[in-house]
């Protein structure tokens, strides 16, 4: 792979993550975990990130404010919400 190809790939990634760059580390971690896993609940995110549930809630609220994640109710359990990355 040439140097030009690597730079071109980085430029596309920069634009995609731009809305998250200035967020707290917990929000960045939650976003990255959602990038690897299509849809997760808040409790699954806490389990995957090893963050406390309260921190995950805060990270999700910051990501929702920036329109970086979408949430919807779970069909199998209406008490839970499913989160997906929107960038």
Image: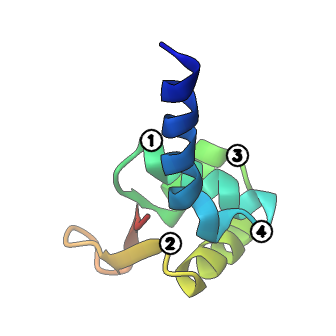
Earlier-in-chain disc, 1 versus 2: 1
Occupied quadrant, residue 75: bottom left
What residue is shown with label 2?
A: 68
Circle 1 packing at 10 Å, graded few (<14), some (14-19), many (20+), is few
Q: Is residue 54 left or right of residue 42?
A: right
Residue 63 in the image, given as x and y percentages of width and height: 59, 74
Residue 52 visible in the displayed image: no
Residue at horizontal 59%, vertical 73%? Answer: 60
Which badge, 4 or 2, is on the more N-terminal residue? 4
Q: Is residue 48 left or right of residue 58?
A: left
Q: Residue furthest bottom?
A: 65
Front disc: 4 or 3? 4
Distance between the alpha carbons at the discs numbered 4 and 1? 21 Å
Image point (40%, 67%), residue name: 86
Tell me which residue sits at (21%, 67%) in the image: 76
Q: Nearer the viewer, mark 1 or mark 3?
A: 1
Circle 2 sits in a helix, a strand or a loop, which is it?
loop
Question: Mark number for residue 50?
Answer: 3
Q: Is residue 1 visible?
A: yes
Q: Which of marks 1 and 4 precedes in the sequence? A: 4
Q: Which mark is first along the chain, 3 or 2?
A: 3
**Residue 84 pos. (x, y %):** 39, 63
Residue 9 marker: none
**SS at badge 1:** helix
Residue 53 image offset from top left, x and y in percent: 68, 65
Coloring basis for residues: rainbow
Vertical arrangement, residue 12 with respect to residue 87, above or below: above
Direction from residue 39 to residue 2 in the image, left or right: right
Q: Which residue is mark 1?
A: 36
């Amino acid at each position: 792979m040439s140097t030009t190809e690597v730079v071109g790939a980085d430029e596309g990634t920069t634009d995609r993550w731009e809305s998250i760059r200035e967020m707290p580390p917990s929000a960045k971690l939650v976003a990255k975990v959602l990038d690897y896993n299509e849809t997760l609940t808040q409790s699954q995110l806490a389990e995957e990130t090893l963050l406390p549930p309260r921190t995950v809630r805060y990270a999700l609220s910051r990501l929702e404010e920036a329109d970086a994640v979408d949430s919807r109710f779970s069909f199998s359990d209406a008490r839970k919400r499913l989160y997906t990355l929107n960038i």
